[in-house]
Image (cartoon, grey):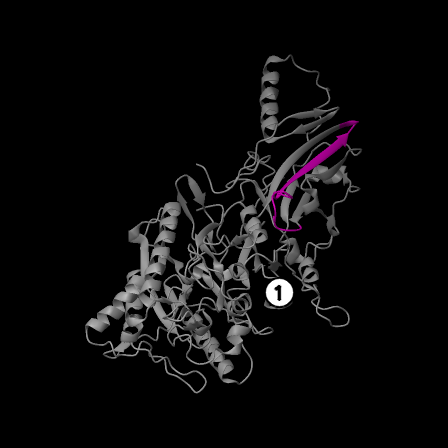
Amino acid sequence: MRTGFPLPARKDRTFRRGHTVRTTSRTRRATLALSVIAAIIAPAAPALAAAPPPRADLRADVDRDGRVDVAGATDNAGEDTWTPTRGAVFLPNIDDDTKRCPTADPRGRPLPDARLAACNDALDTRVNGTPDAADLARVRSVPMKGLPASASGTLRVVGGAKNTRVFVKRGTGWVWVTAGTRLTAAELRAGVEFGVEATDVVRDPALWGGRAVLRLTVTSGGKATSDDVTLRVAPLLTHHHLQNAQQVLVTRVPGADPYARRQQAFVRGLAAEAKAAGIGNPLFTFDRYEDIWAQDFVEPGYVSMTGPDGRRQVIRVMLRSAQPDRESGRELFERLRGKGIGVVQVSGVRESEEWTLNSMGNLETIPPYAHAGRSFPAGRIVMGERKDDGSKPARAMRTLLQAQGFQDPLLLDTSWLHVGHVDEFVQFLPAPDTARGWRLGVADPEAGLRLLRDAQKAGHGTTRMFSVPGGKDLPAPKETIDQALASKWLVADNTMAAQRIRANLEVLKRETGVTDAEVVRVPALYTRGTEHGERGDRVPRLTRLGAGQVPESVTEYGQQKRLAREGERATGPGSAVMTSAYVPGAVNGVLLGRDRYLAPKQWGPVIGGRDVFTDAVTTAYTRAGMKVSYIDDWDTYHLGMGEVHCGTNTLRDASAAWWRR
C-alpha cells in the first residue's frame, strides 16, 4: 500500500573494509546458516582449536514494544532501515524537565525569542535526572562472551550526527559518548546500554531527514567487527478529535471593565463545561499578554515513542504560530514549557506571507484514515489558503509540517473568509458507529437561509434577527428577519459561501473517502463586514457588526488588528467576497468529550419561545450522536470575527501508537 509518508531507500547490507567486518541482521542469519552447514560437512576440528571471536551486535527497539531484545531475534529484521510501521524511534528531547531554562537575563530583562527557543534539555551534554533519562531511546549491545581483556569498543553516530546525541550508562550514571569514549572489554562482555536523543525535530528534510545511524565497533587482537542500527526521530504530530481532551487552555483578561468582566464570566462558564464533560484537569489560563485568541497563537502537538516500561513516553510540543510579532507566543516558553512539555517555533517567515493565515485556527487535523492507497494513521492536517490571490500559510511552517512525513497538509480554499481559517466552516466529530470512526461537520448557509425564509413565510418576518440582550456599551442589533432577507447582499453572500463550502467538501470527500451520509450539515449564516452603497461609498453591512464599538481587547490582538493594518485586500474579477459568521458559527466550537460538544450560543430569532437556530443546530448534532451545550461568546469573541474554538485550545491524550491505525 502506498502511504502518506516517504520511505527511505534500502542500503547495501554487507561491507568489508580491511580487517573490519560490519554485520547486519541479514548477514547474521547467513553466518548462522553457513556455520550449521560447515559443522555438518567439515571434518572434526581439533579439540583445542580457538573459537571464532564474537561479532559486534547492536540492537534497538525495532518492533517498538519498549524492549530491546538482545536474547532473541524480534528486533533484528529491519534494524538497518525504517518504515512507518517498523523501525527504532527516538525523541527530540526539547522539553525542560527541571525548569532550568531562563526567560529573562541576569538584569531581569525578557530574553529575545531566539534565546527562549534555544534552551531545552537537549541543549547540554548531561542527563538531567530520571525524567530526562526517560526521554532517551535505548540501544543495547548483545553481550560478547569470551571477549579478551585487551578488547575495546567505540560507538559512533555515522549518520545524522549533527542532530543526535548518545549517552552510555555506567555505574556513575549516564555519560555523554564522544569521539574519545572507549568501551571496556568488561562492559562489552556484559552488554552495554546506550541512551539516544535528538536535539531538535525535523524542520527541513533538505537539511536533516530525521535518521540517525549508530555504529558499534569492537577491536580485538588487531581485528575489528562492527554493526549498525538505524533510528528515526519521532514525528511532531498534531492532535485529532479521536484523542480525548485532557485539559482546556484559555486566556483570562484581568481587570474590572465591562469587557473584562464578560470575558472572565466566559472563562468560568468554560471551566464548568469542561468539568461537566469529565475533564479532570483545571483550565490553564494564559494571563500575560491578553491575547484572547488562544487557538491562534499555538497548536498543541506531541512526539512519542514506547518507553522501556512498555508505556508510551510522550513529550507535548507547543507549536508556536508563524507570527514572529505575536508576543503572546512567548508565554508558551515562559509558563507552559517544563517537564514533558517543549516548544517549537519556526524562523524565516516572510513579511509578504499573509499574517492571518498563519494563525493556528487555520490548522485542523482530520482523524486517522486510509483511502485510495494512502494511509494516515496519525491523521492529516488541513490548512486554508486563498486561491484567489495565491496566499498560503508560511512556507517555513508548511515545510516543517510536511517534513514530519505523516500528516501531509491538505490545503482548502478560504478565500471567501475575512479571517481565512478552516475552523470557520469545517470540523471532525467522533462517530464510533461508523467504519471510519468519525464524521465530517460543515457549516450549511443554505440551511440558515431556509430557517429565515420559513420563519418569514410563517408570518414572523418582523421578529428581531438576534435575541441577544444589549448593554450600555454594546447595544443589541435591531434588524428583523424581513430586513435581513431584504439586504442586497445577504442571500448572495450565503449562496457564494455555500458554493465555496461545497467545493471544499468535494476535496475532502475525494481525499478521505467520506460519503454524504457521513457529513453533518450545521445551519450557519455568513456576512460581509461592509458593503458598497449606491454612490460607491462603503457602509456598514447590517447592524450585527455595527452594534456598538467592538471592545479594544478583541481588536488589540489577532485577526482584527492585522486586518485593520493591512486594510481591504484588492479585489478583481476573480476575487472572492470575504465574509465572517453572521449568526455565531456553531461549527466553530470545541469538542470536550467523545460525545460532548460546546457551541457558541446562537442568539437567533425567538419564535414561540424557542431560538430557531439553537433548535436546528441541536438537532444536527444530536443526529450525529453528540450532546451539545452552549456558551455565550457574542461580546467576547463573536464580534471580533471568532467563536468559542478561536478563544480556546485543548491538550489531548497522546498515549496511542501513532504508527498503528
In the orientation shown, which residue stands out farthest toward the bottom?
A: 472
Residue 552 position in % (x across, y down): 53, 78
Residue 320 position in % (x across, y down): 58, 60
Q: Which residue occupies the foreground of this view, 352 or 582?
A: 352
- The image quadrant of residue 273 is bottom left
- In the displayed structure image, the side of residue 503 where residue 174 appears, left or right: right
Q: Is residue 527 above or below residue 57?
A: below
The answer to whether any part of residue 381 appears in the image is yes
Residue in the image at 45% along x and 47% along y: 377
Q: Which residue is mark 1?
A: 325
Q: Secondary structure at mark 1?
A: loop
In the orientation shown, which residue stands out farthest toward the left?
A: 458
Residue 581 position in % (x across, y down): 39, 67
Find out whether residue 216 is within the magenta segment. yes
Look at the image and tell me in which quarter the N terminus lies. Answer: top left
Residue type, mark 1 in image: Asp
Mark 1 Cα-neighbour bin, 10 Å: few <14, some 14–19, many ≥20 = few
- In the displayed structure image, the side of residue 618 where residue 546 appears, left or right: right
Q: Is residue 540 above or below residue 243?
A: below
Bounds of the magenta segment:
199-223
Find out whether residue 95 is within the magenta segment. no
Residue in the image at 54% along x and 67% along y: 562
The answer to whether any part of residue 619 appears in the image is no
